[in-house]
Amino acid sequence: MKKMMMMAAMMLLSVGAFAQNEVGQITLKPTAGINLASITDSNDPKMRIGLIAGVEAEYGVAENFGITAGVFYSQQGVKFDGKESSTLYADGQLVGGTTFEGKATYKLDYINVPIMAQFYPVKGLAIKAGVQPGFNVLKKVHRDGTWTTAGVLGGNQQTVDEDYDIEDGVKGFNLSIPMGLSYEISDFVIDARYNLGVTKIFDDGDNKHSVFTFTLGYKFAL
């Protein structure tokens, strides 16, 4: 029994000591996958499924430790299904309003730059966390439903199914904390992360991004 336990311990130690990257080595990893994106502090949000693609570089600091930096195009945002209302005032007096009923998809796309530390407890498996600055490059909302307007000059109803630009209110910079796991199989890397929003998305409100990311990459040494 003691011999078996010693053999098992030696096997675990040999696996744990396996060098994931050579010290000083730089690798590149082109990557693509999907986002399951939502936002916090909102009423009954639904996930927007989007694409993510980019490239990530890793520097081998030690046998079981590396630092990565990447650049990714990331489709984020959220979906809603229900009613949204707004009011219009003139000289302090209520003069009208609009109500949208249907489906709305907020398309908020970013160039994200994740900078992460990676620890390899066993061969192929990495535990990672870091920071991720993001820069907004697209802000649209797609509405599929009915607009109803009302006011002192009358009202009307209109059916819509199209994109609208969001002119104001979306912050250009976003910061999040990415954390996750990855596993390498024959130079292919399966990666799962959760991106926790730190800064607010809009000028008004406390909404922050909440994004699950699943990607597949191919890793090669320079």
Image (cartoon, helix red, strand yellow):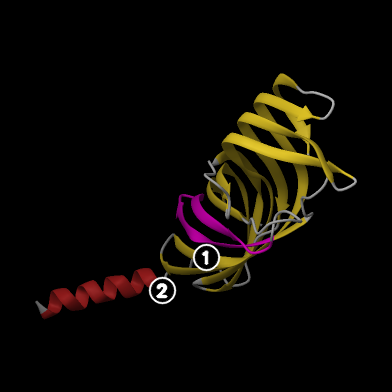
Is residue 177 or residue 86 the one in the foreground? 86
Tell me: residue 36, above or below residue 17: above
| Image spot of residue 96 (x, y percent) | 79, 35
Who's the residue at 76% across and 40% down the image? Answer: 87
Q: Characterize the local packing of mark 1: few (<14), some (14-19) or many (20 or more) Cα atoms within 10 angstroms.
A: many
C-alpha distance separating marks 1 and 2: 18 Å
| Image spot of residue 34 (x, y percent) | 56, 41
Residue receiving disc 1: 128
Tell me: residue 10, above or below residue 107: below
Q: Is residue 84 magenta?
A: no
Is residue 152 or residue 109 the one in the foreground? 152
- Relative to residue 18, is residue 138 drawn left or right? right
- Mark 1 belongs to which amino acid? Lys
Who's the residue at 64% across and 44% down the image? Answer: 77
What segment is highlighted magenta in the picture?
Answer: 175-199
Who's the residue at 58% across and 38% down the image? Answer: 80
Which of marks 2 and 1 precedes in the sequence? 2
- Relative to residue 136, is residue 184 drawn left or right? left
Q: Which mark is residue 17?
A: 2
Residue 149, quarter of picture:
top right
Q: Secondary structure at mark 1?
A: strand
Q: Is residue 176 magenta?
A: yes
| Image spot of residue 36 (x, y percent) | 54, 44
- Relative to residue 156, is residue 126 drawn left or right? left
Q: Is residue 21 visible?
A: no
Query: Of tags 1 and 2, which is closer to the observer?
Result: 1
Is residue 163 or residue 50 the one in the foreground? 163
Q: Which mark is residue 136?
A: none
- Viewport quadrant of the N terminus: bottom left
Q: Are marks 1 and 2 in contact (CB under 8 Å)?
A: no
